[in-house]
Image (tube, rainbow, N blue to C red):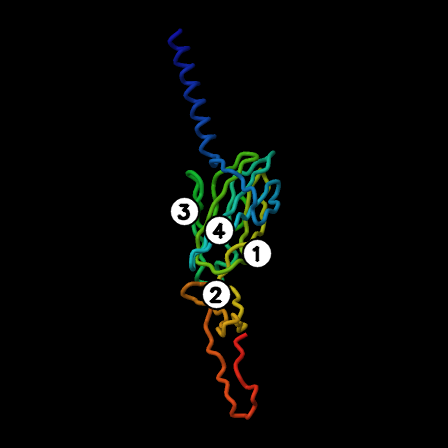
Amino acid sequence: MNHLKHLLTLYKSMLLMMILSIAFVSQINAQTCPTNPEVSVAIGNSIAHFVGVEYNGCSSSWTYCIESGSNPSVSHFGFNLNNADDCTELSHPSDGEVDAPGYCSAGENDIDPSCGEVFNKFDCGIDSGDCACFTITVDAFSVDPAGMTLYTKSGPSCDSAVLPGPSCIPPECDGTIVCDGEGNLSYLEYNPDTCECESISVLPPDCDDDDCNTEDFYNPA
């Protein structure tokens, strides 16, 4: 009898460990919430953060965080690049192209049955008050104020929020000719090889007195 009780106790302990293990892996590893994001908006009872973007030539890395609310907390979340179908420089990255914490990676850009929306899904939850952040790296040149949509599922509620995201429209470069005061003229022009506005030198005007105007000379100032 004692042996049977021992086996029953051992079985209950193993079952409890399995339940705890399942509960643990269903939640994403908590991260530090951003203290100074560029944009924060409500997404249901949670908060969506656009942390910012870093450029490296024609490549750019965009970081976002979901700060989960409570009762209920976020059960899964995702993102959609709103400009991905408008140009060839953007795609809907998943897996290795999305830097996300722990085991949880983004799935393919597809419809989520529970929400009826199309997005790259992180199929993992976020505990109340915790943050889950991810970074996507794409070929993009500038910021679209409505270039990214984030999605959350909390209990029966599916919510979305629009945030700044990548755009394939090149940045506007000031084409006005300027003088540096030393006779050097230049203007800014977009370089598709570096994806940046670069200074283009301009030769000073050819000044002469053929028109008999004694004031016809180049002023470097």
Are the residues flagged by discs 3 and 4 in contact, CB closer than 8 Å? no
In the image, residue 113 above or below residue 144: above
Density class for disc 2 (Cα within 10 Å; few <14, some 14-19, many ≥20) is some
Point 56% across, 40% down: residue: 67
Residue 173 in the image: above or below residue 100: below
- Measured Cα–Cα span from mark 2 to mark 1: 23 Å
Callout 2, which amino acid?
Cys
The foreground one among 140 and 38 is 38
Which element carries disc 1, helix, strand or loop?
A: strand
Outermost residue to the front = 214
The three-letter amino acid code for the residue at tag 4 is Trp
**Residue that mark 2 sits on:** 197
Q: Amino acid at mark 3?
A: Asp
Q: Quadrant of the C terminus?
A: bottom right
Q: CA distance from mark 1 to mark 3?
A: 24 Å
Residue 216 locus on image (x, y percent): 55, 86
Q: Secondary structure at mark 2?
A: strand
| Residue 26, position as x, y percentages in the image | 47, 34
Q: Which residue is mark 1?
A: 146
* Number of residues whose C-alpha sits closer than 10 Å to that of mark 3, classed few (under 14), some (14–19) or many (20 or more): some
Dot 1 and dot 4 residues touching (CB under 8 Å):
no
* Nearest to viewer (mark 1 / mark 4): 4
| Circle 1 crowding by C-alpha within 10 Å: few under 14, some 14–19, many from 20 | some
- Which of the two discs, 4 and 2, labels the residue nearer the N terminus? 4
Distance from disc 2 to disc 3, alpha carbons, whole Å, reads: 32 Å
Judging by the rendered image, the residue that carries numbered circle 4 is: 62
Q: Quadrant of the N terminus?
A: top left
Q: Position of residue 22 (x, y in %)?
A: 45, 30
